[in-house]
Image (spheres, rainbow, N blue to C red):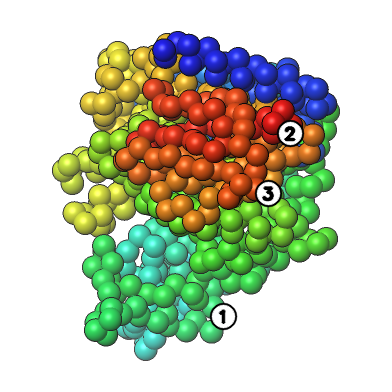
């Protein structure tokens, strides 16, 4: 039965590809439609985040590198991704594993050379894969030449490139108190005393990551130059790290303390009183900066690297209205794709919340393109945030279905496609991430979601040579959860991801259709229709419970009852014949083409 169903699904995929060709869209590009090299390539794109330290080690030092990524490009092409986003690969003391940058125009020797980077770009381009770099503009390393100059004296020309303030009650012999109560994201005061120049500098993140002063136009000019440097080398764009934190309240006012219902201060995992965080995040100046950077990047396109250079924003925001602002204003665009973290980091499977958030991002961002994302290098993996310990793989099928069959672009994290699990350290002495070192034991850090990619069941999971020591331990799960084992299993999670991505690229309704929610009163099944003129709509239904469900998707008889042609269904799941009765197994998924023209 399984092989019959798989054959039928494959046939449907081929029929969908034929439909796309008839509609005028080529499906000949292995990992994208004809528009993959054009102006709007990013609107239906699949982005894949790579944490370079953990993807593939090519030289046996236990740390992933650029040559290793290049070696795995064929895999990424087969998976179907349009672009890879690399977390920082610039020279760095590695306090925050690359997010503390000491030189923005080179490659850290741990990862390779500029020549290795150029080869990666060239080889990726041959496979229709673009390369996106991380751009960190909020802060630098304290070892960056700018900051070394800045802290050398109060009169140095670079002094005003960073945020310096006198202490409260400071005297010639006493440093006083920090300028205000602002806190670092990673615990404790956001102010660090500098004895030599006798002032405090501000750091939203680690002590070794001083914040740049974006009220200084020279900082703007420096980053326009940096962006241009990499665009000339052929990068397809940037993901902007912590971008909403560029500016601070000019009055340096204390943040309000958060309190519980009894009026007691709420403590965070670092033992600090939690603060409102409104005076150092999402201030209006960010929009001016991003419009300026976007204008710089929009000038770049050439025959060797054609198409739009895309801007992706790390945008953790309080509501959909704030997310909508990140796209910019007419004539002053900012991000092409600010991340919709409001859906992806709900961290619970709940039909009503998923539906509301999807409706928000489909209808309340001014007609712009959503970027859905459920996972990244700063959060526990999907199993830890969404899994129940019993149906984890099926839950990941549900999440990936929402990710890839909703309108817009999709971003996922390396290893999601095989179901890699979160594996945090069990002892403080094993912790590498300073977040865990600071917050242990309540906060174990981010090592658990950054473990090496699990390629096969050999020693060290194929990440590095058997005689090497990987920078983080290989999880025990690698023996059974790896690419090599899953690529020959048609029921694997990897096969599911490949099928979803192929549908996203070859089925016209999924590639460019509107999202229309169905059965909106149902509290157990999330369902929607993707519809575009001239092509049969696609129906998607996901059961978000552990019990079998049967649902009528005719919207009270407003839609014809069938027939349905199955495109993809959870392995072993029922195969419905019409919209009238769609049955789903526990945490099951059904995707079908609704041939409504045949039923009329």
Q: Secondary structure at mark 2?
A: loop
Where's residue 41, x and y in %? 73, 36
Where's residue 318, x and y in %? 51, 66
How packed is label 3: few (under 14 Cα within 10 Å), some, or many (20 or more)?
A: some
Q: Secondary structure at mark 3?
A: loop
Quadrant assignment, res 594: top right
Residue labelled with disc 2: 600
How packed is label 2: few (under 14 Cα within 10 Å), some, or many (20 or more)?
A: few
In the drawing, does residue 421 fall left or right of residue 179? Answer: left
Closer to viewer: mark 3 or mark 2: 2
Residue in the image at 25% along x and 49% along y = 444
Residue labelled with disc 3: 369
Residue labelled with disc 1: 250
Q: CA distance from mark 2 to mark 1?
A: 65 Å
Closer to viewer: mark 2 or mark 1: 2
Quadrant assignment, res 259: bottom left
């Amino acid at each position: 039965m399984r092989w019959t169903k798989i054959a039928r699904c494959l046939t449907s995929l081929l029929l969908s590809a034929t439909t796309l060709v008839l509609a005028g869209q080529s499906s000949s590009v292995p990992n994208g439609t004809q528009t993959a090299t054009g102006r709007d390539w990013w609107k239906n794109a699949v982005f894949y985040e790579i944490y370079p330290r953990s993807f593939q080690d090519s030289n046996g030092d236990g740390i992933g590198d650029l040559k290793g990524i290049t070696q795995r490009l064929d895999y990424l092409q087969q998976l179907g991704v349009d672009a890879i986003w690399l977390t920082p690969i610039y020279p760095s003391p590695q306090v925050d594993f690359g997010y503390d940058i000491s030189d923005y125009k080179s490659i850290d020797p741990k990862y390779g050379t500029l020549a290795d980077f150029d080869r990666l770009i060239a080889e990726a381009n041959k496979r229709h894969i673009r390369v996106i770099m991380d751009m960190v503009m909020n802060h630098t390393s304290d070892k960056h030449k700018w900051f070394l100059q800045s802290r050398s004296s109060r009169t140095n020309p670079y002094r005003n490139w960073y945020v310096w303030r006198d202490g409260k009650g400071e005297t010639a012999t006493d440093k006083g108190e920090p300028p205000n109560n602002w806190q670092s994201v990673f615990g404790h005061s956001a102010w660090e005393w500098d004895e030599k120049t006798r002032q405090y500098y501000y750091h939203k993140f680690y002590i070794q990551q001083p914040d740049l002063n974006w009220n200084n136009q020279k900082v703007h000019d420096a980053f326009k130059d940096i962006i241009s440097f990499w665009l000339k080398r052929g990068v397809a764009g940037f993901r902007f790290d912590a971008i909403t934190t560029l500016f601070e309240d000019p009055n340096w006012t204390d943040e309000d303390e958060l309190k519980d219902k009894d009026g007691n201060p709420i403590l965070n995992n670092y033992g600090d009183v939690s603060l409102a965080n409104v005076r150092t995040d999402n201030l209006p100046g960010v929009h001016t900066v991003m419009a300026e950077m976007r204008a710089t990047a929009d000038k770049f396109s050439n025959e060797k690297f054609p198409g739009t250079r895309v801007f992706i924003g790390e945008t953790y925001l309080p509501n959909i209205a704030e997310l909508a602002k990140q796209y910019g204003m007419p004539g002053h665009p900012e991000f092409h794709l600010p991340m919709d973290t409001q859906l992806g980091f709900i961290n619970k499977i709940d039909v009503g919340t998923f539906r509301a958030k999807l409706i928000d991002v489909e209808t309340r961002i001014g007609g712009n393109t959503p970027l859905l994302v459920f996972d990244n290098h700063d959060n526990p993996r999907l199993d830890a945030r969404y899994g129940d310990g019993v149906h984890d793989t099926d839950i990941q099928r549900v999440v990936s279905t929402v990710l890839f069959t909703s309108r817009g672009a999709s971003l996922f994290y390396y290893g999601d496609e095989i179901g890699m699990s979160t594996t945090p350290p069990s002892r403080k002495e094993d912790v590498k991430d300073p977040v865990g070192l600071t917050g242990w034991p309540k906060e174990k850090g981010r090592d658990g979601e950054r473990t090496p990619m699990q390629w096969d069941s050999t020693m060290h999971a194929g990440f590095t040579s058997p005689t090497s020591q990987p920078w983080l331990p290989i999880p025990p799960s690698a023996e059974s959860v790896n690419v090599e084992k899953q690529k020959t299993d048609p029921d694997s999670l990897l096969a599911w991801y490949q099928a979803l991505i192929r549908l996203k690229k070859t089925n016209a309704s999924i590639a460019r259709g509107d999202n229309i929610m169905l059965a909106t009163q149902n509290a157990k099944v999330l369902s929607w229709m993707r519809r575009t003129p001239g092509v049969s709509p696609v129906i998607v239904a996901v059961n978000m419970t552990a019990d079998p469900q049967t649902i009528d998707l005719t919207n009270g008889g407003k839609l014809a009852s069938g027939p349905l042609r199955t495109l993809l269904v959870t392995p072993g799941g029922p195969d419905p014949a019409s919209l009238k009765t769609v049955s789903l197994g526990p945490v099951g998924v059904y995707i079908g083409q609704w041939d409504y023209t045949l039923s009329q």
